Amino acid sequence: MPSEPKILINEHDISRAVGRLAAEIRRDYKNKNPLLIGILKGSFIFMADLTRKIDMPLEVDFVRLSSYGSGTESSGKIRVLTRLQEPVKGRHVLLVEDIIDTGLTTAFFIDYLRKKRPASVRLCALTEKPARRKTDIEINYLGFQVPDKFIVGYGIDWDEKYRYLPDIRYIE
């Protein structure tokens, strides 16, 4: 078992970043009734806080993806485990992610969405680890860049543990 996770980004800084992101999204999506799509499970807390702070008409949906393979590394082979319930065609879609790591899963899902012919697709990520990127991803709305450490908390887990933490921490 790893040592107790150490705080990387505190609750106050997360709240301020979510407020900033919400203001940018509200400005860019005014009168567009965007469809926010959260990637489960990690994005659910961030998506809930973000949705409340956006405070304008919008719709939400969730998808569950799996990048199967052994160990902690993505194989690059992605499966959609839970499909979207809301139609995407002609909609302004905002994909909401907890973390962009290698970018492989996100790139796969953006391509999957574009095949459904939305009016637009943008990406909002709470965190990104540039050091681990394997594919070029444009993040339109970003909360934080984080170092190449294993992070948990604020919905992000390690083996289903630590999601409940109110801040973002790292495990040594």
Image: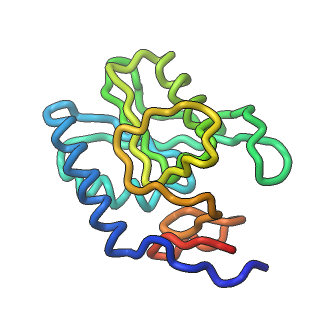
Horizontally, is 8 left or right of 103 in the view?
left
Location of residue 149 in the rendering, given as x and y in whole percent from the top left corner: 63, 63
Q: Looking at the image, how many numbered discs can be counted on the residues?
A: 0
Q: In this orientation, which residue lies closer to the viewer: 116 or 103?
A: 103
Which residue appears at 48% of the width and 43% of the height?
Answer: 62
Hey, which quadrant is residue 26 in on the image?
Answer: top left
| 142 relative to 21 in the view: left or right | right
In this picture, is 151 found above or below 142? below
Q: Is residue 26 left or right of residue 150?
A: left
Q: Residue at x 42, y 56 (%)?
A: 144
In-front residue for pair 167/132: 132
Colour style of the rendered protein structure: rainbow
Residue 119, position in %: x, y? 32, 19
Determine whether 99 is above or below 62 in the image: below
Considering every residue shown, the one lying at the far right of the view is: 70
Quadrant of res 93: top left
Q: Position of residue 69 (x, y in %)?
A: 82, 42
Instruction: Locate residue 10, reporting x and y percent.
Output: 41, 75
Of the pair 137 and 22, the residue shown nearer to us: 137
Name, please, the residue furthest toward the bottom. 4
Q: Would residue 100 be found to the left or right of residue 2 on screen? A: left
Residue that appears at 27% across and 65% down: 16
User: Which quadrant of the figure contains the N terminus?
Assistant: bottom right
Quadrant of the rendering where the C terminus is positioned: bottom right
Residue at (52, 74) in percent of width and height: 164
